[in-house]
Image: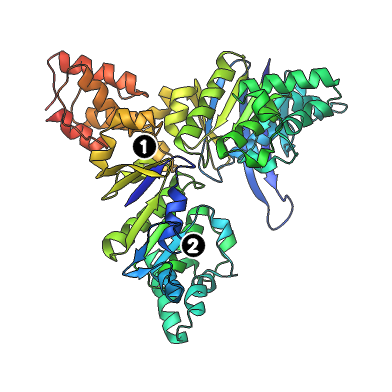
Amino acid sequence: MSLKLEGVCYTYQPNSPYETPALKNINLEIHEGEFVGLIGHTGSGKSTLVQHFNGLLKPTAGKVTVDGIDISAKGVKLKEIRQKVGLVFQYPEHQLFEETVFEDIAFGPKNLGLPQHQVVKRVKKAMAMVDLEYDRFKDMSPFILSGGEKRRAAIAGVLAMAPKYLILDEPTAGLDPRGRDEILEKIDHLHHKEGITVILVSHSMDDVARLAQRLVVINQGEIFYNDRSRTVFAAHKELQHMGLDIPTVTKLMIRLKEKGWPVRSDLLTIEEAKEEILKIVRGGRTGA
Amino acid sequence: MAVIGHNGSGKSTLAKHFNALLLPHRGSVSVNGMDTRDKECLWEIRRQVGMVFQNPDNQLIATTVEEDVAFGPENLGVDPVQIRKAVDESIVSVGLTPYKTRAPHLLSGGQKQRVAIAGIVAMRPNYLVLDEPTAMLDPSGRKEVMETVTRLNKEEGLTVIHITHFMEEAVFADRVIVMEEGQIALEGTPREVFSQVEKLKEMRLDVPQMTELRDSLVREGIILPPGILTVEEMVVALCH
């Protein structure tokens, strides 16, 4: 079971003077249970790419399959595909519209035609997943919530569809540190505890380094890297050339290596860096 | 100066007091000796204290970059020759000369914020207040804006008050204040403030990664100087 893109090309305004190729021959497979980070510069084609996963955009050439179903094939119900593949846009709270938090989250399941008790169950579960207390928030207007709460309510609206695959396009943009932490913690939890497959589009290398198992780097509409995070960040010169950053810890290890320390430069987290530095310092090698 | 703190901690409310967008219920705010409650001084205060907000799309109004930048000085009734000069100079100072006649809405986020900054600079302010100017930008946009702001501060002597959620931006300020529940919770140089790892974590604010690494190495018995903020400082300390 997987999301699969084969030879996908997408061109904005084809056959016009404004023709812009946004995706060029993309081959990518996301397996069930994975946590994949998608990174790239603004305008690299990330958002165009994620909109292919649930059929919001149809490829100009190539094929998109969701769990083996070609989503462009005749007779395929996109509604079912979109229920399976949940997409959380950037600033999803701009899409809140109902009078109460409950109604907003219930909108999707209701449209699926579920009976009321099922809808309530779905809403309760989705709210629990994003840590919004049901009794406290259900009757509130979504517009009086804090920025972080609004965003979690919007994510709950997607989770209420019980998606198998969850794609989040920069879910932490514009939030304060506490809001960022809370959202990332929830996403990590959705992956580990609920078994949801996650694709996280992010500008924060420190965040994807910590969370994702695999990284896909997209530049000018093409996939440049598709590998374990460690391997990808080792190509720091190329990444920086694309205008992308690398995790702070990786930067430190590269600098230490340049200074002659015999350290690994493919480390990603503070914990890993600590262990590596301790090994060297305690081993009596303190560098220059 | 950098101001950090959570949403709802009072950062923006504080910022709006600097140019009389809000007036204090108690106490007083003065800008170069002018009381913000004095209506006579309002326009002069707003000219001296310019503000740039989070969302670049909400601040641009004209159809070309130069017209947008000219909006402020025009409203102040400045002589047209002077306006031309002020507009040209401020567009140069934010590095947007090649984009002078472009439509602002077609620029990137970072460029839009620099147009907004140029619009303020054209009014020849003494203070520039930036309320999370990089929150909605990508890393390269953030870098552009930070470089522009740093240059205005260092080379043109503009006083900058920068409200941000990104600790790595606050690291380069001369002074940092941390707001919490409407009060100043911490104040000092970045080194003094960020070395209080426990306190910052208690407030659930980010600690620069190198500061955190320094603390965990010290707990393991490694001797390192306090107040390490950047990768370079860590490299120097370790190689010492």
What residue is drawn where x is 33% and y is 28%? A249
Q: CA distance from mark 2 to mark 1?
A: 46 Å
Check the image and tell me how it is coloured: rainbow
- Residue placed under numbered mark 2 in the picture: B21
- Does residue A240 sit above or below B216 in this rendering? below
In the rendered image, residue B44, in percent from the top left (x then y), is placed at 41, 74
In the rendered image, residue A82, in percent from the top left (x then y), is placed at 75, 28
Which chain is indicated by disc 1? A
What residue is drawn where x is 41% and y is 46%? B164
Q: Amino acid at mark 1?
A: Lys
In the rendered image, residue A97, in percent from the top left (x then y), is placed at 73, 41
**In the drawing, what numbered circle is on residue A237?**
1
Mark 2 closeness class: few <14, some 14–19, many ≥20 residues within 10 Å? few
Which chain is indicated by disc 2? B
**Residue at mark 2 shares a chain with residue at mark 1:** no
Nearer-the-camera pick, A168 or A262: A168
- Does residue A18 sit above or below B90 in this rendering? above
Nearer-the-camera pick, A127 or B224: A127
